[in-house]
């Protein structure tokens, strides 16, 4: 199998580089710091390619293992600094300000020289997120002086609970930091224009519109006016509107809840939003259309040759075979959420179907 893959890439150097890119994706998506599987695979590859060629990958895995220990240490320190009921910190007063309560922050601390180039965004996190990042960064500096953290704001994920006024239980969402920052601003005021959000986040209006698609699709945010060429206006949905949206989606079901074995599973009005979400990381719209066609051909080829595949395996295979820029000079950079939205679109078009947690070609 390894010989076949090396033959596909043309040289062992290119194969190792592609494995390094795929490993980076797997490690960054691993929220539990569990590297057992990666260590096992790496040991096998070291037998085939030698320790020298795999040294960089070994350092990447070690970064994640070290991150687990550092994060645990910092979390314990910050927890001990939480103010008591009277507003006084336990023990002697700390030199640094108390950490803001109510949030748990994890971090993958990378030796950036040894990692593939990671996408960076100048997006400014919401103050509620930024305060925790700053507190974490201060403790890291004390622990690893003179090293400092440089945050990559667009990477990672945020698990948050949203509860509208009058709602008895909170709804849990796992989203990107950008999407979390967007919805957090609606806790400050109920309505924003895309221009206001772009200014607040030091970002672009187009980026705001792309990221907002998820909250619109889930009924949390409503579009008040698209404004044509001017700024789009958004507002927080009412509890009644959110319940109506949720009820409609449950009747139709969807891949994300695995409630339906096959067929059409998304409201027609959501189609543009799903495609927008799929294009979210692709930039220019004309180039995005071209890239999506290329991705489709790869997916169709996989399912033709391998039968049925789960989402995570399709994602890993696309990363492996397209990360060198095989898509007309562009690397594959969809995340799992965007790929899922793209595959839902192919299901609506009756090109593929979703059965028993796997995708396959539609039987004709």
Image (cartoon, helix red, strand yellow):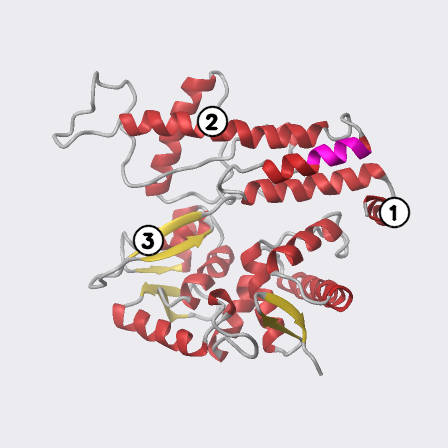
Q: In percent of the image, x 66 and y 66: which residue is there?
A: 289
The residue carrying mark 1 is: 7
The picture quadrant where one finds residue 214 is bottom left
Residue 302 lies left or right of residue 37; in this view the side is right
**Separation of disc 3 and disc 1 at Cα?**
48 Å
Residue in the foreground of this view, choosing between 130 and 18: 18
Neighbourhood count class around disc 1 (C-alpha, 10 Å): few under 14, some 14–19, many 20 upward: few
Q: In percent of the image, x 43 and y 53: which residue is there?
A: 174
Task: Pick whichever of labels 2 and 1 is earlier in the sequence.
Answer: 1
Position in image of residue 19 (x %, y %): 72, 41
Stretch in magenta: 42-48
Q: Is residue 133 covered in magenta?
A: no
Task: Pick whichever of labels 2 and 3 is earlier in the sequence.
Answer: 2
Image: 299 above or below 331: below
**Separation of disc 2 and disc 3 at Cα?**
27 Å
Image: 255 above or below 322: below
Position in image of residue 177 (x %, y %): 45, 47
The picture quadrant where one finds residue 73 is top left
Residue in the foreground of this view, choosing between 161 and 100: 161
Residue in the foreground of this view, choosing between 150 and 57: 57
The residue carrying mark 2 is: 69
The residue carrying mark 3 is: 161
Mark yes or no: residue 280 visible. no
């Amino acid at each position: 199998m390894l010989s076949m893959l090396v033959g596909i890439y043309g040289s062992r150097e290119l194969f190792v580089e592609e494995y390094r890119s795929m490993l980076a994706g797997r490690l960054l998506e691993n929220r539990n710091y569990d590297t057992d599987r990666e260590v096992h695979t790496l040991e096998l590859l070291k037998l085939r390619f030698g320790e020298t060629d795999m040294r960089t990958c070994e350092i990447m895995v070690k970064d994640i293992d070290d991150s687990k220990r550092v994060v645990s240490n910092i979390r314990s320190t910050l927890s001990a600094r939480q103010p008591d009921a009277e507003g006084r910190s336990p023990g002697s007063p700390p030199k640094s300000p108390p950490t803001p309560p109510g949030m748990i922050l994890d971090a993958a601390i990378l030796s950036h020289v040894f990692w593939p180039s990671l996408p960076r965004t100048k997006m400014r996190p919401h103050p509620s997120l930024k305060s925790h990042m700053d507190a974490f960064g201060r403790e890291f500096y004390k622990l690893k002086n003179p090293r400092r953290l440089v945050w990559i704001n667009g990477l990672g994920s945020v698990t948050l609970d949203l509860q509208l006024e009058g709602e008895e239980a909170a709804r849990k969402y796992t989203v990107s930091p950008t999407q979390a920052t967007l919805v957090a601003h609606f806790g400050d005021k109920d309505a924003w224009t895309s221009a206001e959000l772009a200014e607040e986040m030091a970002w672009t209006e187009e980026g705001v519109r792309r990221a907002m698609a998820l909250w619109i699709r889930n009924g949390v945010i409503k579009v008040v006016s698209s404004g044509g060429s001017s700024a789009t206006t958004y507002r927080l949905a009412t509890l009644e509107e959110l319940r109506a949206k949720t009820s409609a989606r449950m009747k139709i079901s969807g891949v994300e809840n695995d409630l339906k074995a096959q067929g059409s599973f998304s409201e027609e009005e959501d189609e543009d939003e799903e495609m927008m979400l799929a294009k979210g990381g692709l930039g220019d719209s004309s180039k995005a259309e071209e890239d999506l066609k290329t991705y489709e051909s790869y997916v169709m080829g996989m399912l033709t040759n391998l039968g049925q595949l789960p989402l995570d395996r399709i994602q890993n295979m696309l990363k492996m075979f397209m990360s060198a820029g095989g898509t007309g000079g562009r690397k594959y950079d969809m995340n799992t959420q965007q790929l899922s939205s793209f595959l839902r679109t192919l299901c609506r078009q009756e090109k593929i179907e979703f059965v028993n947690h796997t995708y396959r070609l539609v039987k004709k």
